């Protein structure tokens, strides 16, 4: 029972990263970045396919050398999801991956060098309809900006971003998105707020170098949650020192919590207490692992007692309210005659959840077919 978000997003310019729209009225895209060696084509392709299965909309690949550019060509041939090439300094690499079908260039125009090199990349991007992402990072600001501001702050990140924006504006190129990332939550939030007031292009949100799986997820949820709640942001990347699949999961969890976008099951579960009639924590962990493949949006409440169980179940697609021996079972807010044996909760709930997901998918297919007729 996915409820509509009360958040009013800023309407930015819509651009396309391959087949994925970013900005405007498009869903907020979730992306990640490979952490394999790009020259290891097999490993990189395998990782891209795993994150795509997890729900990624866009994947970024680092292309630091010409050798990596040649590997990128093979990677692009073996994958379907839109790919962004992460390039620094060498404009020739940008031209090469553009030739090989890249869907977006992550490249700061001011770092490429001479004006003729910048123009060559922009002209190529125009010719092939390839957008650019300007990526400003608090840890790698231009030397003169560092000297001017002494330390990274929101104004410094904004000035750096606008330098690159001005270059693209002068070259009459408007197919770009911008990020102003920092590892400090407050710094990143302030920089994005300032940038959102200055430009109408899509913003790529992220707390860079956020940390490990737990701390990084918390910092990203706070920083991105603040901005998304204010209607700022068109695509997100959660930067974790962890498997990129985890970045996708956390990204969708953030969007799901703000009712912006839903994918898969939203488990509503009590933290458990002495009232619980079954092991709630064990049950939820088992179901999360078993049902990772479900993409249908669904609220499933698993509450260990009758105090809060029925109330949560009434607002869920599937609900369980703990009771002695056998627990109450609800579907679409209605209590069912069936009661689920507490010793067989995981198997029974998995069966019911999969059946409901399959039914929802079939309904969606029929609806699409009717629209096409």
Image: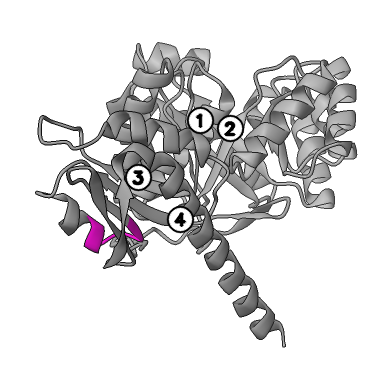
**Label placed on residue 352:** 4
Q: Which residues are magenta?
A: 313-318
**Label 1 with label 2: CB-CB less than 8 Å:** yes
Q: Residues within 10 Å of mark 1 (few under 14, many from 20)?
A: many
Q: Nearer the viewer, mark 1 or mark 3?
A: 3
Of label 2 and label 3, which has the lower sequence position? 2
Please state if 196 lies on the left or on the right of 32 as rendered: left
Q: Which residue is mark 2?
A: 32
* Gap between marks 4 and 1 measured at Cα: 29 Å
**Label 2 with label 3: CB-CB less than 8 Å:** no
Please state if 175 lies on the left or on the right of 195 as rendered: right
Q: In x, y percent, where is residue 82?
A: 72, 44
Of label 4 and label 2, which has the lower sequence position? 2
Q: Nearer the viewer, mark 4 or mark 3?
A: 4
Q: Which residue is mark 3?
A: 267
Relative to 372, say whether 38 is above or below.
above
Q: Which residue is mark 1?
A: 247
**Label 4 with label 2: CB-CB less than 8 Å:** no
Q: In x, y percent, where is residue 361?
A: 58, 65
């Amino acid at each position: 029972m996915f409820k509509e978000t009360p958040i009013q997003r800023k309407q930015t310019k819509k651009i396309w990263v391959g087949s994925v729209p970013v900005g405007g009225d498009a869903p907020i895209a979730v992306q990640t970045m490979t952490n394999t060696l790009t020259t290891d084509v097999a490993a990189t392709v395998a990782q891209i396919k795993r994150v795509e299965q997890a729900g990624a909309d866009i994947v970024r690949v680092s292309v630091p050398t010409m050798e990596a550019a040649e590997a990128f060509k093979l990677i692009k041939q073996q994958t379907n999801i839109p790919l962004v090439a992460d390039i620094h300094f060498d404009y020739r690499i940008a031209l090469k991956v553009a030739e090989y079908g890249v869907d977006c260039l992550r490249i700061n125009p001011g770092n490429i060098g001479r004006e003729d090199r910048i123009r060559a990349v922009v002209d190529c991007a125009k010719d092939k309809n390839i957008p650019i992402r300007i990526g400003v990072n608090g840890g790698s600001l231009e030397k003169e900006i560092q000297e001017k501001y002494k330390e990274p702050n929101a104004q410094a990140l904004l000035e750096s971003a606008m330098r690159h924006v001005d270059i693209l504006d002068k070259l009459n190129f408007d197919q770009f998105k911008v990020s102003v990332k920092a590892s400090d939550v407050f710094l990143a939030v302030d920089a994005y707020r300032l940038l959102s007031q200055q430009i109408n292009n899509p913003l790529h949100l992220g707390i860079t170098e956020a940390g490990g799986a737990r701390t990084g997820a918390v910092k990203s949820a706070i920083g991105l949650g603040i901005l998304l709640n204010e209607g700022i942001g068109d695509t997100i990347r959660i930067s974790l020192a962890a498997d990129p699949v985890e970045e996708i999961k956390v990204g969708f969890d953030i969007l799901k919590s703000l009712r912006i976008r839903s994918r898969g099951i939203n488990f509503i579960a009590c933290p458990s207490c002495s009232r619980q009639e079954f092991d709630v924590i064990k049950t939820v962990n088992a179901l999360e692992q078993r049902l990772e493949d479900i993409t249908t949006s669904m609220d499933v409440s698993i509450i260990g007692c009758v105090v809060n169980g029925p109330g949560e179940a009434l607002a869920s697609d599937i609900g369980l309210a703990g009771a002695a021996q056998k627990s109450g079972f609800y579907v679409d807010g209605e209590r069912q005659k069936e009661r689920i044996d507490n010793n067989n909760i995981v198997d029974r709930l998995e069966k019911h959840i999969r059946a409901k997901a399959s039914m929802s998918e079939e309904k969606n297919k029929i609806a699409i077919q009717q629209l096409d007729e």
